[in-house]
C-alpha cells in the first residue's frame, strides 16, 4: 500500500495522451459535459471588455470553443493547442474553395500539438488564453499557469475552468481501496494562490456543483471512458477489477441512490486573471518607471 501512496500525486501524462487519442474519433458525441462547462465559461465573457488580436485555446481538443470565440472576436487570430495529435485532426471546417481563391473569409483556426507546460510561443504574443477543463490532467497546474502568463501580453486575460476536489466523490467512496480512481483535483483557493505566484493580478475564482445522474454505475463508466476521462493517475489499479470486488463497489454506490438515480458530483472551478505590467525583472530587480513632468 505504501508504494501506491508514494505515487498518488503523479499523473501519467502518456496515459492522458493515449486516452484522448483513443476516443478522438467519437469525441464529438461524448463531450456533452465539456461543452456545457464551455457554454458557462463563455457567458462569463459577457462581462469582459477585451479586443484580442490573438486567442490561444489551451487544451482545445476537437475545437469545441472555436466557433463561439470566433463569433465573439471575428478579428482575432485563433490558435488551438493540444497534446493529442488525433484530437487536433478532427472537425476542421475549411473555407469554401471560392473564398480561398478570392482571398476572402476567415482562415480556419491554426492547430498545434504541444505541451501546456512548454508553449512554443513568444512571450507577450497572445491577448487571451482560454482553457476549458485542462488543468486537472496536469501533475501540477503551476507550470502551465506560468506559461500562460509568459505568453500573454500586458493587459491580457487568462480564463479557465477545471475540476475541484469534490468531483466524483461518490466513485472514490464506493471504491475506497487505496488506489486512485479519479484524477487528483486542486482546491480553488490553491489555484488562486498559484495565479498570484505567477504574477497575475486580481484573480477571480468561483465554483459551482453540477450533479449528473445515472441509471447504473456502468453508464457512468461508459461516459467517462467515451470522453477520455477515466483515471490517469500513476496510482490507479493496473489490473482488471475482480467480479467480487466490483460487486462490492456496485453495492456501495447503490447505497447512494437518490430518487431512483445514482448521482455523480462534479465540482467545476472557474477562474480568470489579468496580466499587469511587470514590477520586477526576471532576476528579481525592481522596475521603477519615471515619467517626465508635463510642461506648463
Image: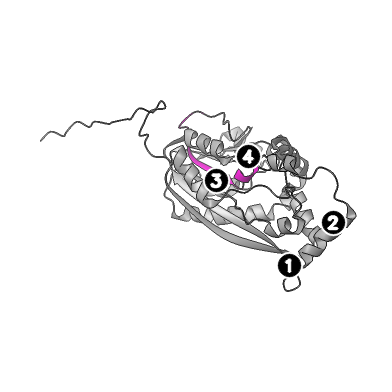
Sequence-earlier tag: 1 or 4: 4
Q: Position of residue 188 (x, y in %)?
A: 53, 51
Magenta residues span: 122-137
In 3D space, how far apart are the residues under numbered discs 3 and 4 (Cα atoms)?
31 Å
Residue labelled with disc 4: 139
| Residue 295 in sight from this viewpoint | yes
The single residue placed furthest to the top in the displayed view is 283
Q: Secondary structure at mark 1?
A: loop
In 3D space, how far apart are the residues under numbered discs 4 and 2 (Cα atoms)?
28 Å
- Few, some or many C-alpha atoms within 10 Å of disc 3 (few <14, some 14-19, many ≥20)? some
Image marks 2 and 1: residues in contact by CB distance under 8 Å: no
Sequence-earlier tag: 3 or 1: 3
Residue labelled with disc 1: 256
Q: Please identify the quadrant where the N terminus is shown.
A: top right
Q: Secondary structure at mark 3?
A: helix
From the viewer's side, name the closer residue of 243 and 150: 243
Residue labelled with disc 3: 70
The single residue placed furthest to the left in the displayed view is 296
Sequence-earlier tag: 4 or 2: 4
Residue labelled with disc 2: 246
Q: Secondary structure at mark 2?
A: helix
Amino acid at each position: 500500500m505504501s508504494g501506491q501512496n508514494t505515487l498518488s500525486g503523479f499523473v501519467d501524462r502518456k496515459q492522458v495522451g493515449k486516452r484522448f487519442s483513443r476516443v478522438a474519433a467519437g469525441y464529438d458525441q461524448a463531450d456533452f459535459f465539456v461543452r456545457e462547462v464551455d457554454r458557462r465559461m463563455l457567458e462569463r465573457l459577457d462581462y469582459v471588455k477585451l479586443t484580442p488580436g490573438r486567442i490561444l485555446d489551451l487544451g482545445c481538443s476537437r475545437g469545441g470553443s472555436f466557433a463561439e470565440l470566433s463569433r465573439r472576436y471575428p478579428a482575432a487570430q485563433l490558435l488551438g493547442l493540444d497534446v493529442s495529435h488525433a484530437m487536433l485532426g478532427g472537425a476542421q471546417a475549411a473555407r469554401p474553395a471560392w473564398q480561398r481563391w478570392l482571398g476572402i473569409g476567415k482562415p480556419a483556426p491554426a492547430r498545434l500539438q504541444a505541451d501546456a507546460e512548454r508553449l512554443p510561443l513568444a512571450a507577450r504574443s497572445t491577448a487571451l488564453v482560454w482553457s476549458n477543463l485542462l488543468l486537472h490532467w496536469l501533475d501540477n497546474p503551476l507550470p502551465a499557469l506560468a506559461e500562460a502568463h509568459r505568453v500573454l501580453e500586458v493587459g491580457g486575460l487568462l480564463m479557465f475552468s477545471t475540476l475541484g476536489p469534490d468531483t466524483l466523490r461518490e466513485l472514490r467512496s464506493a471504491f475506497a481501496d487505496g488506489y486512485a480512481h479519479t484524477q487528483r483535483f486542486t482546491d480553488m483557493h490553491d489555484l488562486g494562490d498559484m495565479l498570484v505566484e505567477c504574477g497575475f493580478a486580481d484573480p477571480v475564482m468561483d465554483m459551482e456543483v453540477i450533479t449528473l445522474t445515472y441509471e447504473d454505475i456502468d453508464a457512468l463508466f461508459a461516459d467517462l471512458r467515451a470522453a477520455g476521462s477515466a483515471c490517469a493517475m500513476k496510482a490507479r489499479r493496473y489490473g482488471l477489477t475482480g467480479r467480487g470486488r466490483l460487486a462490492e463497489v456496485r453495492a456501495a454506490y447503490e447505497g447512494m441512490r437518490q430518487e431512483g438515480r445514482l448521482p455523480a458530483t462534479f465540482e467545476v472551478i472557474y477562474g480568470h486573471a489579468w496580466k499587469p505590467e511587470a514590477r520586477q525583472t526576471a532576476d528579481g530587480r525592481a522596475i521603477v518607471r519615471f515619467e517626465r513632468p508635463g510642461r506648463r
